[in-house]
Amino acid sequence: MKLSNFVLLLLVLNFLSCSNEKQEAEAKHAEYPITGVPFSKVKVNDNFWLPKIETNRTATIPASFQKCEEMGRLENFLIAGGKMEGIVRGDMPFDDTDVYKIIEGASYSMTTIPDPKLDAYVDSLIEIIAIGQEEDGYLTTWKTIDPTHSPAHWCPPGERWEGLVCSHELYNAGHMFEAATAHYLATGKTNFLDIATKNADLLLSVFGPGKNPEVPGHQIVETGLIKLYLVTEKQEYLDLAKHFLDGRGDSTKREIWGPYNQDHKPVIQQEEAVGHAVRAAYMYAGMTDIAALYNDEAYTIAVNNIWDNVVNKKMYITGGIGSLHDGEAFGENYELPNLTSYNETCAAIANVYWNYRMFLLHGDSKYIDVLERSLYNGVISGVSLDGTNFFYPNPLSCDMHYHFNRGHLERQPWFDCSCCPSNLCRFMPSVPGYIYAQNDNEIYVNLFVQSSTKTKLSETDVNVMQETNYPWDETVLIKISPEEKSKFTVRVRIPGWAQNQPLPGDLYSYSNTVGRKAEILVNGKKINFEINNGYAVLTREWSVGDEIRLTLPMEVRKVTASKLVEDNHGKVSLERGPLVYCVEEKDNPEIESIVVSNETQFSNHFKNDMLSGIEIIEAKGKSMGETFTAIPYFVWNNRGANKMDVWLKEN
Ligand code: FUB
Ligand code: ZN
């Protein structure tokens, strides 16, 4: 792949929105195999995502800014800049990043819905951030305030760049780069970008061949640098990103830190997902960027191998990754406990970032299958329906004894380590960016969300519209209206679950396979279609008003896990469409006696008045235990703490 191809490819990754003419002009110069249609070009008008994105804008982002103010996150910048007296506030060496991540979310939000008040507030925060930056560009407030005093008992104090394994200086930089890029693309202003490039230039003078050989203890600076490169075109930023990745696990130049930091062997030799899950998934996203950007086979092979390991051995049915509380880490192969599953919200988000890049690199819908599963289950379970309370871990069972949510049984408004709420702030407004993608003469319909967009193919511009009540209903109407009648391809994703495969790989399977297949009508006529890389490939001469009607078999399905997953022996979980279901004590006072047998009958119906409107599953059978109600996993724990199970005993 040519460098310029990848530049554009990355430009349209979920974070990056081309909202002004300058960016559109940049985009026109590039060529690339597949590019996502950026969220700023997609108008979502559905009943599922739009309310969630709106809740993020009106509740989550303001509440999170408020928390940053209350918890001293802003004061740290002022103290660092000598405008206030005091010692560092907060408990984490990366508290600065909460401010950055919420600004990133606010920037995305402003791209879709202009908000002058929010714009002015964000500018005032950027002024405060600038105060915390040292003359030479250095910016990590706790070290500037007093390098002899660490806010975290688990990370010793030290001068600049000392103790990078835990100091988070490069993690702080990475989130700043991602946020500053988003802010620049959203507003066209350079006030934040200037802070970021000043810091990145300092990194260039400190790290790189023949300089400080250390690598980040927590990855994200790599993708941050790549985004900075995309907007500045400064090649050194890109080179430094690759340099940081190349340096991991190389014991000839530095003392390596081991598997927890994915620093046990060179990244291109890694085959198994190990260690801290968020670090890992951010790194795999960065590696995928490098694989595409440099057309690097070794990087491509490595991310393919690691991906195979994750989907076949280390992923929850909810798309969650990182099963262990201990170290917030991946467990051994098939080590997927339910009650104690960690499944950090940030890791689910990182899994989306990574899988989207894998799709852009390979054009296979199996990556979108993983992305969709994470998105509809393990990501949005992280936030309450009102947008103000959060899960850090997302377990698959709750017994009311194991206080899984950092000592609590319910979602919390904030945490001492508040990475997950601020990650949701930045993630939610970007969801429309995962729906469509394209290359020269093909349009990909990846997610089924009522929405519209306009894509520019080589021959013509094409308006694409979806009408659907997905994920509740199984029909999707896709309207294709080219400005000029012309021949091109529409690739409509046929989800794995609609082809009797819950996830790519053999970790999970359905015990009641459904005979009904996905069906497609074009302009009212049923067609036979080929499935290629997971897509129905519809190539024809399209004209204004053409319609594709997709019907997906949304029967209730029973999932079983590989026998190697000990916790799920003799158990099944329920799914419908992309949604994983669970049972809660609220609906099922006798939750412990719930059982599923071959005779259990399932029906589903929509309950408008329940949990903001959900499709419930009702089970009926010969025994009392077979009569129960299941709800989508992502809404559990919105009616107070109570027992919950995803995996149900099978009789
Ligand atoms: O270390 C920064 C963030 O805090 C990680 O990504 C999360 O897992 C939490 O530990
Ligand atoms: Zn987190």
Image: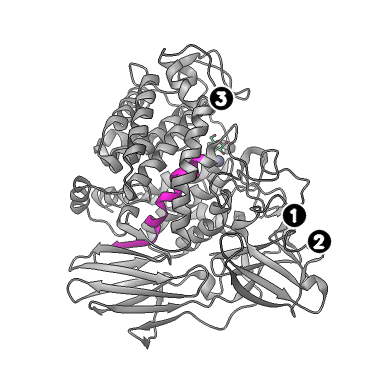
Residue that carries the numbered disc 1 in the rendered image:
643
- Residue 269's x, y, as percent? 49, 45
Vertical comparison of 356 with 72: above or below:
below
Q: Observer-nearest residue: 110 or 227?
A: 110
Q: How far is disc 3 from disc 2 in space, using C-alphas?
A: 41 Å
Residue 171 seen in render: no
Residue that carries the numbered disc 2 in the rendered image:
592
**Circles 1 and 2 in contact, beta carbons < 8 Å:** yes
Residue density around tag 3, few if under 14, some if 14–19, many if 20 or more, within 10 Å: some
Quadrant into which the C terminus falls: bottom right
Q: Residue at x 67, y 45 (%)?
A: 410
Badge 2 marks a residue whose secondary structure is: helix
Residue 197 seen in render: yes
Residue density around tag 2, few if under 14, some if 14–19, many if 20 or more, within 10 Å: some
Query: Left or right of 123: which side holds 287?
Result: right
Check residue 90 in the rendering and tell me which mark sits there, or answer none.
Answer: 3
Q: Which residues are magenta?
A: 422-438
Residue 508 on the magenta span: no
Amino acid type of the residue tagged 1 in the rendering:
Lys
